Image: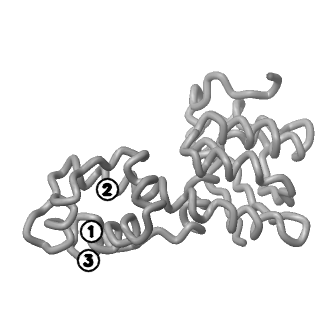
């Protein structure tokens, strides 16, 4: 594919893959529980979210949280604490189930009104020698097609999200779209 970066950072440029920043922004819009899973309050909030309905509990099991009902009751009662590995599984299952639950609503919000305005801040070239620096500018684009990105984000598929961002959105920037594959920040709200 033309304009793709194959050797990013060779001359000292710094930035993050745009699709990773899109995933971070979608995570922020999803509204995850702010309290850490290592605290009692955070653990109970996640367990309550995962066990309030049979569908959520089934999705949590499918996401990798496999414990007996007895162990789950002990965690909820506070008589037993989950191991570090189980805390990671609880957090992973919670995030997977939460993404799945909010994806449809988030997609509707992002597509409403003809799309969502996205601000793209170019990569940092402060460490790049002067002859190799590009002229980059702050860009704004109205993204109208969020289906591929939100679906990939909800599934946790970073490769599909990158493909949806790189081939579905960036070409709308024009002939120099490859210069915005790696950036310092991407902002949007819905």
Left or right, 140 with respect to 33, comes to: right
Among all residues in the image, which is located at the extreme left?
79
Residue occupied by mark 2:
90
Q: Quadrant of residue 102?
A: bottom right
In the rendered image, residue 178, in percent from the top left (x then y), is placed at 78, 35
The numbered mark, 2 or 3, whose residue comes first in the sequence reads: 3
Residue occupying the point 69% across, 28% down: 5
Counting other residues with Cα less than 10 Å from the Cα at mark 3, is it few (<14), some (14-19), or many (20 or more)? few
Q: Quadrant of residue 156?
A: top right
SS under mark 2: helix
Q: Is 18 located above or below residue 11 in the figure?
A: below
In the rendered image, residue 154, in percent from the top left (x then y), is placed at 59, 51
Q: Is 143 located above or below residue 135 in the figure?
A: below
The numbered mark, 1 or 2, whose residue comes first in the sequence reads: 1
Say which of 106 and 64 sits in front. 64
Q: Quadrant of the C terminus?
A: bottom right
Evaluate if marks 2 and 3 touch, with contact meaning CB atoms under 8 Å apart: no
Left or right, 98 with respect to 46, comes to: right
Left or right, 4 with respect to 48, comes to: right
Circle count:
3
Residue occupying the point 61% across, 34% down: 159
Residue occupied by mark 1:
43
Residue occupying the point 44% across, 68% down: 53
Q: How far, Cα to Cα, is label 1 from label 2?
A: 8 Å
Q: Is 155 located above or below residue 79 in the figure?
A: above
Q: How far, Cα to Cα, is label 2 from label 3?
A: 14 Å
Q: Which mark is residue 41?
A: 3
Q: How far, Cα to Cα, is label 1 from label 3?
A: 6 Å
Evaluate if marks 1 and 2 touch, with contact meaning CB atoms under 8 Å apart: yes
In the rendered image, residue 167, in percent from the top left (x then y), is placed at 80, 36
Q: Quadrant of residue 152?
A: top right
Which colour style is shown? Answer: one colour
């Amino acid at each position: 594919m033309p304009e793709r970066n194959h050797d990013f950072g060779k001359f000292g440029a710094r930035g993050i893959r745009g699709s990773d920043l899109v995933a971070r922004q979608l995570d922020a819009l999803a509204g995850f529980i702010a309290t850490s899973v290592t605290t009692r309050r955070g653990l109970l909030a996640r367990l309550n979210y995962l066990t309030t309905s049979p569908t959520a509990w089934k999705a949590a099991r499918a996401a990798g949280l496999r414990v007996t009902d007895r162990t789950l009751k002990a965690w909820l009662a506070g008589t037993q604490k989950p191991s570090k590995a189980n805390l990671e599984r609880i957090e992973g299952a919670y995030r997977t189930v939460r993404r799945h639950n909010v994806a449809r609503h988030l997609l509707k919000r992002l597509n409403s009104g003809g799309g969502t305005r996205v601000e793209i801040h170019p990569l940092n070239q402060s460490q790049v020698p002067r002859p190799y620096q590009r002229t980059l500018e702050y860009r704004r684009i109205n993204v109208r097609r969020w289906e591929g990105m939100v679906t990939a984000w909800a599934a946790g598929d970073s490769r599909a999200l990158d493909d949806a961002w790189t081939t579905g959105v960036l070409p709308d920037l024009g002939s120099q779209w490859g210069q915005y594959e790696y950036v310092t920040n991407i902002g949007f709200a819905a």
